[in-house]
Amino acid sequence: MKRKIDLRTIMNGAIIEMFDEEMRKVLANIADENTAPNASRSVTIRIDVEALAPPPKK
């Protein structure tokens, strides 16, 4: 059976919450008077995928 895998299903959607939190940090940094407002910021999402061995055939 094939399962649909997307950001909503990875870690039960927790990755979306993690992104939202990091984006809030970026926006707070831009609004901070002690940082350059025109400097580039980034949020990186890295997902490592490994193939699972198929279950042994009976």
Image: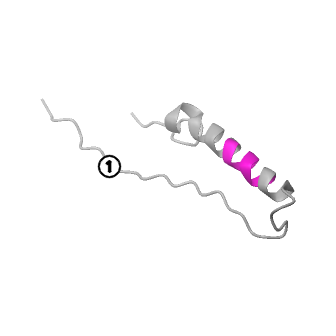
Observer-nearest of 54 and 27? 27
Q: Is residue 8 above or below residue 39?
A: above
Q: Is residue 29 above or below residue 1?
A: below
Q: Is residue 20 above or below residue 47?
A: above
Q: Is residue 24 magenta?
A: yes
Name the quadrant containing residue 58: top left
Query: Total of numbered circles in the picture?
Result: 1
**Residue at point 78%, 56% (across, down):** 29
Q: Residue furthest front?
A: 34
Q: Is residue 47 left or right of residue 58?
A: right
The magenta stretch spans which residues?
A: 21-27
Name the quadrant containing residue 34: bottom right
Q: Is residue 32 left or right of residue 53?
A: right
**Residue at point 75%, 46% (across, down):** 24
Observer-nearest of 54 and 25? 25
Q: Position of residue 36 (x, y in %)?
A: 82, 68
SS under mark 1 = loop
* Residue highlighted by disc 1: 51
Observer-nearest of 26 and 3? 26
